[in-house]
Image (cartoon, grey):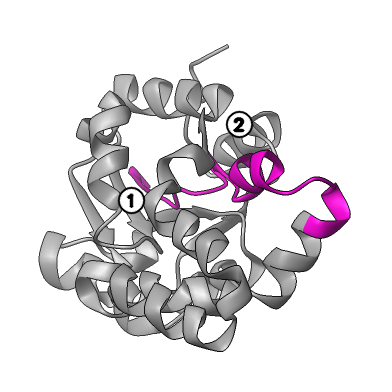
């Protein structure tokens, strides 16, 4: 087994809208309420599915006109939600690369915003292929987006390790025959990869 497929957000990239909204709202309680009731995960997921950000902001601002400026910030200041790389996991990625492993990424990410990540993180060029949900108008855990790895890059799912911090995505990968790893930390990831026969020759 020499093929590893990474999720990006929460595994290799530290992305969190709180980084932005803690600058815009006075208390953590107000931040949490805004993210839970206005710019909800479900609303954001539609941009990951391919909806344009202009359309998303217009739709939500019509529903919450008093929050229109804050809603627009989610789009126009989106880059401030990126805290940076998850350095320890990037080290794991580098070690896998050095072993000659085949590396791919499968991410729920807006097609409009993914170029920001490509510009910021040079190590994205290490992947032989990246499937971005917003470009495909499919989001995990839909099995069809996993099958794109096979259709486009020839990845045999039954011979690949899949890494994700979202349990439903891990379960979907398992059901497709992948060796699925629930990411919680880079240290545990190393243990899990060793169990799968990878990184065995590395400290």
Q: Residue furthest top?
A: 203
Residue 96 location, x and y as percent? Answer: 38, 28
Q: Which mark is residue 190?
A: 2
Q: Which residue is mark 1?
A: 105
Find residue 39 and report its image quarter.
Answer: bottom right
Compared to 83, does 1 lie above or below? Answer: below
Relative side of 171 to 72, left or right:
right
Residue 195: image tag = none
The magenta segment: 1-30
User: Residue 176 appears at what percent x and percent y?
Assistant: 43, 78
Q: Which residue corresponds to the image point at 26% horizontal and 25% vertical from the top-left?
A: 122
Q: Quadrant of residue 203?
A: top right
What crowding class fits label 1: few (fewer than 14 Cα within 10 Å), some (14-19), or many (20 or more)?
many
Q: Dot 1 lies on which element?
A: strand
Which residue is painted at 28% across and 41% down in the image?
Answer: 116
Give percent across and percent down for residue 76.
Answer: 38, 51
* Residue appearing at x 30%, y 71% in the figure: 54
């Amino acid at each position: 087994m020499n093929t590893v497929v990474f999720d990006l957000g929460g595994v290799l990239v530290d992305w969190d809208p709180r980084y932005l909204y803690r600058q815009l709202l006075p208390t953590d309680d107000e931040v949490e309420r805004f993210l839970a009731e206005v710019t909800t995960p479900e609303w954001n997921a539609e941009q990951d599915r391919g909806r344009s950000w202009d359309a998303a902001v217009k739709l939500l601002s019509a529903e919450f006109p008093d929050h229109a400026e804050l809603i627009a910030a989610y789009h126009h200041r989106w880059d401030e939600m990126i805290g940076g790389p998850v350095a320890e996991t990037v080290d794991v990625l580098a070690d896998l690369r050095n072993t000659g492993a085949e590396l791919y990424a499968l991410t729920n990410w807006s097609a409009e915003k993914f170029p920001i990540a490509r510009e910021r993180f040079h190590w994205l060029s290490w992947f032989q292929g990246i499937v971005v949900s917003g470009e495909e108008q499919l989001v995990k855990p839909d099995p069809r987006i996993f099958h794109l790895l096979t259709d486009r890059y020839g990845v045999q799912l039954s011979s690949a390790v899949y890494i994700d911090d979202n349990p439903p995505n891990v379960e979907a990968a398992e059901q497709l025959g992948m060796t699925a790893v629930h990411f919680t930390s880079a240290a545990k990831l190393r243990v899990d990869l060793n169990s799968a026969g990878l990184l065995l020759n590395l400290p």
